Image (tube, grey):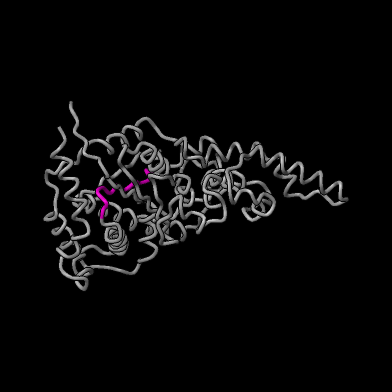
Amino acid sequence: MVLFLNLKNMKTLCVDAQYLLKQSFFGNKDTYSDGFGNIGAIYTFFTIIRKLLKEFSDIDRVILFWDGAKSGKLRYLLYDQYKSNRIGKEWYANPLELTDKEIEKEIDKDKSILTQRIRIKQYAEELYFRQVEDEITESDDMIAYYCQNLKKDEEAIIYTSDRDLCQLISNKVSLYLANKKQLITPNNYFLFFKHHLSNTVLIKSIIGDTSDNVPGVQGVKEKTLLKFFPEIKKKTITFNEILDKTKLLQEQRIENKLKPLKSLDSILNSKDIYERNMSLVDLSKPLMTPEAIEICNDTHILPLDDENRGSKNLLKMMSDDQFISLIWNDGDYVDYLMPFINVINSEKDYLKNYE
């Protein structure tokens, strides 16, 4: 097979779809239509992507990265408390116990999210969005793998709220953090964060991640590190350099007849914690199944089949769901579709040039 890959100056929008789905659902739970029911997540999901495509009108490709049903299991195998503060993972050593009422509420919520997720994926197919999902691999790892394997003239923008993905920022990869509503690059990173970009993983490995139930060094927060190791703000430093300076700081306190600080003692005894957390948060080595790698590689190279795909199908679904009535104040269907046209045309051209 001969490939003609017209990837020159290609710009790809990598969407943390799992985050965007939950953001859309919890941010708009009260929007209903007679045709579909709770449709708020669908509406908000595509409203946000549409705004991004209007802001970055040179996007050629959109990829939705989804978590699979068992995502997180690879990290659980490294640390059996990983995300054990979450609901619905049957392999957790100590699953959360819920009351019958809480279980019923979770079932109703999950059913609504799943129903809208399925419809979002169907809309996305008609808009020529690429979609990536593996049962076990987390979306973060697949985004990392994709961005590490960008083609020579390809650039990427990642949309997420997950600061873990800041470590992927490079000359070819920018990050649009949802809560910042700004595009973050190597050149402006210091405007948003108090540490040097290259120390992102180091800091996370020391302080841990409460949202994923990954404990850090006891008594040590980012403020602690910035106070005692101000060089973190300006240049790359290593964990060994942290240890060496910590030892020196404690010796100086003893010389000055001051008590050693517990937080610094904790750092001196934190090598095991640091190494464990590095294995969990360092996306330079994505945790992926062979199937996930193959899916990402195919997504990068293979064209989208345009058979039975297109705006007419989308219009029918939106009409059936009464989605159209939600966007009518913004203009007609064609007007709504305009920000997506560049992606649609780029994918069609890519298919034509694929041999």
At horizontal 50% and vertical 57% (from top left) the residue drawn is: 99
Choose top left, top right, bottom left or bottom right for residue 268.
top right
Residue 294 located within the stretch drawn in magenta: no
Q: Is residue 255 left or right of residue 3?
A: right
Q: Is residue 241 left or right of residue 153?
A: right
Extreme residue toward the bottom, this view: 329
Count of all numbered marks drawn on residues in the image: 0
Question: Whole-percent x and y of residue 212?
Answer: 52, 48
Q: Quadrant of the C terminus?
A: top left
Q: Is residue 207 left or right of residue 332?
A: right
Query: Which residues fall within the magenta stretch?
Result: 58-69
At horizontal 32% and vertical 37% (from top left) the residue drawn is: 152
Q: Quadrant of the N terminus?
A: top left
Q: Is the residue 93 above or below the residue 330 in the image?
A: above
Question: Whole-percent x and y of residue 53?
Answer: 27, 57
Q: Nearer the viewer, residue 56 or 266?
A: 56
Choose top left, top right, bottom left or bottom right for residue 201.
top right
At horizontal 67% and vertical 42% (from top left) the residue drawn is: 242
Q: Nearer the viewer, residue 20 or 103?
A: 20
Residue 66 located within the stretch drawn in magenta: yes
Question: Whole-percent x and y of residue 146?
Answer: 36, 39
Question: Whole-percent x and y of residue 224?
Answer: 67, 53
Choose top left, top right, bottom left or bottom right for residue 4.
top left
Q: Nearer the viewer, residue 5 or 294?
A: 5
Extreme residue toward the right, this view: 257
